[in-house]
Amino acid sequence: MDRSLRNVLVVSFGFLLLFTAYGGLQSLQSSLYSEEGLGVTALSTLYGGMLLSSMFLPPLLIERLGCKGTIILSMCGYVAFSVGNFFASWYTLIPTSILLGLGAAPLWSAQSTYLTIMGNTHAKKAGKHGKDVVNQYFGIFFLIFQSSGVWGNLISSLVFGQTPSQEALPEEQLMSCGASDCLMATATTNSTQRPSQQLVYTLLGIYTGSGVLAVLMIAAFLKPIRDVQRESEGEKKSPPFWSTLLSTFKLYRDKRLCLLILLPLYSGLQQGFLSSEYTRSYVTCALGIQFVGYVMICFSATNALCSVLYGKVSQYTGRVVLYVLGAVTHLSCMIALLLWRPGADQLAVFFVFSGLWGMADAVWQTQNNALYGVLFEKSKEAAFANYRLWEALGYVVAFGYSTFLCVRVKLYILLGVLSLTMVAYGLVECVESKNPIRPPTPGQANQAEDAEIQTKM
């Protein structure tokens, strides 16, 4: 097996184990800890921490620890969050959420940087186009990674399904489900009753063990990226400390990045909507908490399959076609969710919506990362840090207004942001079509950056 592909698989399976735990917990937070909005507040705090760390931590940690060290350290924050759920309260979930959030941006930036470097390195050796190999590697990663939602949600459904908590739902409660839901964030209903504490502890034990295994796998089997860089391009002098620190913000001088900030912002908003509103106001409200895992399995499975499919198809169709497909699919789902009144006798419809949402989300996950890696190849760490910053802001907003806005209003917000996102993305594609010779050679790029730094100083 090719060495680059082997390392991609190690990263992918490490993230599979880690997010089998975190993905399952995230899907259940709004339903499991609905009292006083603790669950969504913890998630909002988590992504607030990710927002702050995106501003400066990723470039610094990647430079000091390398991609491997950054991934290992950040994963420990996810394990701490799982442990914090054993003693769920404002004094445990909020601090561990902050810890996880601080590690999330460096984790994803290191992962994206690692795959991009691996893809470009392999492309040079094999005589292929770098963007094609990078697309393929991201497709492989997200195929494996998105399946974590299948396993995490399957585990939660099997554990909680031992003592079903659903009771007969009165018609007046069903009337408040779906787009009409405005009060569920502050009121516990029959369908949101918590499972027994013993079952909760069993689930948390499984999730914590999965996270620990992820840390051990990365530590034992992943090759440090600095070794790969030395093999392919020799030793390089490290940039100055403040240059690394400010690189995240200096990249905003590129107009393309300013236009692209809506892509990760929308990505965070739509994932936040699915994790909090759809699971709580549609699935849990009408069916019960034990169905959340099964519905999210459909989302994750569709997402995983489409991720690898898009990685292959993009070589022939280009990314524009895929972005249009994702936008049209999400637009259709939002309009349908506004009109649909969920009920327990419409079980298949819950799975259709989650599957279509996963099909569209696969576009944002694979193509957004590949787009940033290709357009900002010379500033990968800073570009991916900016990506995580705006995606985290999307999560913060989605979870932040979760407790006081009606679901209908949230869907209108998503529709508006999606429309603006596609307009801004179209402008970037127009700019790229007029400037086919991008980016400049490494020597020119370094000389220009050094001149700009000296001018600023």
Image: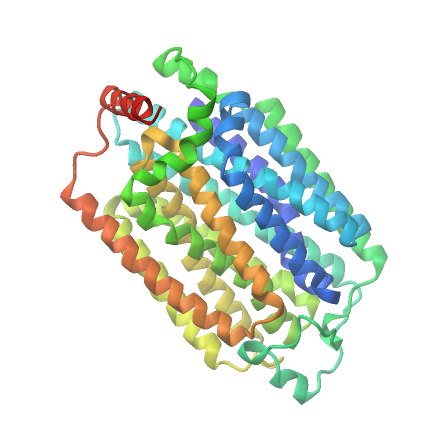
Quarter of the figure that contains the C terminus? top left
Height in image: 426 above or below 449? below
Residue 43 is at least partly visible in this image: yes
Q: Residue at x 54, y 73 (%)?
A: 407
Q: Residue at x 62, y 62 (%)?
A: 294
The residue closer to the viewer here, 280 or 408, is 408
x, y percent for residue 392: 51, 49
Q: Residue at x 53, y 59 (%)?
A: 397
Q: Residue 322 occupies which quadrant of the picture?
A: bottom left
Quarter of the figure that contains the N terminus? top left
Horizontal relation, residue 300 to residue 94: left or right: left
Q: Residue at x 78, y 45 (%)?
A: 205
x, y percent for residue 455: 29, 25
Horizontal relation, residue 326 to residue 269: left or right: left
Q: Residue 286 occupies which quadrant of the picture?
A: bottom right
Residue 207 is at least partly visible in this image: no
x, y percent for residue 31: 69, 65
